[in-house]
Image: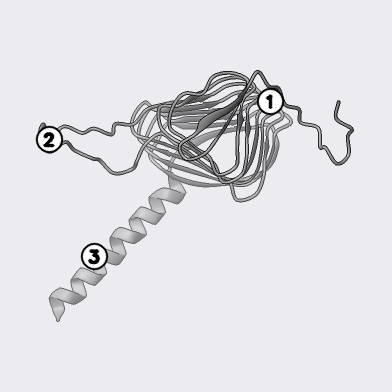
Amino acid sequence: MMKLFFERIKSKLRRFIYNYELTHGKLKVKHEGIGSYKKEVRGGNNLLVIEPNCNIDNPIIHIIGTNNVIIFKENCKIGPRCSFWMEGNGIHITIGKNTSFTNDVHVNAQEDDMSIEIGENCMLSNHIIIRTSDSHPIYSLDSNQRINKAKPIKIGNHVWVAPCSEIMKGVTIGDGTIIGSQTMVTKDVPNNCLVVGRPAKIVKVNIRWSHEDVIFHKCK
């Protein structure tokens, strides 16, 4: 009984220390925008930059590691229940100028030296997942080598990502492209096209899109 009692005490102590480190980790912040955020930081020498005219609605900034950087460029708009995770060391997340997230967008950069770059004038809708890693390793039975290493993600300028889409590790998405609803992107996508499906397939090319709302603006 005493052994079980002490095991429970140690478990509670480990959880307390973990939660304390998450809420008291070192994060240097340069906040020139509007709104607040929630931080969960374990580690040191991490940096959060929110440039002028950004409007953020309490996103979660979750960091485990050191020397990580997340930058929201000028005039970004981040809606409710969005989260930005960095788990590893030397990770960079950049959200370009004039880019907007509607709500429930999860940006997850895991493993050392990974990056997620989202360009300027992008429009991300809701319930979207962007991630550099599978979170758990997969090994070849023949070589015992890991076969699912993390890879960076780059999303170009003026990209529209529709609801419930997933952008997976190693993907580059070209400028002016549309990612349709419920699409899973696992391979590179060129400029100015529309992709849909799981996995994503190109269904239209040589297109352009506008931020205008079709209900309140007449389309030409």
- Label 3, secondary structure: give it: helix
Q: How was the colour assigned to the protein in this rendering?
A: one colour
Q: Label 3 belongs to which residue?
A: 10
Q: Is 176 above or below relative to 25?
A: above
Instruction: Tell me whether the residue at label 3 lies in contact with that at label 2, contact meaning CB atoms closer than 8 angstroms.
Output: no
As drawn, the residue found furthest toward the front would be 203
Q: Residue at x 35, y 54 (%)?
A: 18
Q: Residue 179: x, y in percent?
A: 59, 33
Q: Quadrant of residue 46?
A: top left
Pick the residue in front: 98 or 144.
144
Residue count near mark 3 (Cα–Cα under 10 Å), binned few <14, some 14–19, many ≥20: few
Quadrant for residue 67, please give it: top left
Picture layout, residue 79 above or below residue 171: below
Question: How far apart are labels 1 and 3 at the CA level?
Answer: 50 Å
**Residue 63 picture location, percent across and down:** 43, 41
* Numbered mark located on residue 144 in the image: 2
Q: Is residue 163 visible?
A: yes
Q: Residue at x 68, y 32 (%)?
A: 76
x then y, percent, for residue 187: 43, 27
Quadrant (top left, top right, bottom left, bottom right) of the N terminus: bottom left
- Asked if labels 3 and 1 touch by Cβ distance under 8 angstroms, the answer is no
How many numbered marks appear?
Answer: 3
Query: Secondary structure beneath disc 1?
Result: loop
Secondary structure beneath label 2? loop
Q: Amino acid at mark 2?
A: Asn
**Which is nearer the N-term, disc 1 or disc 3?**
3
For the residue pair 130 and 34, the one nearer the viewer reads as: 130
**Front of the two marks 1 and 3:** 1
Mark 1 or 2, closer to the camera: 2
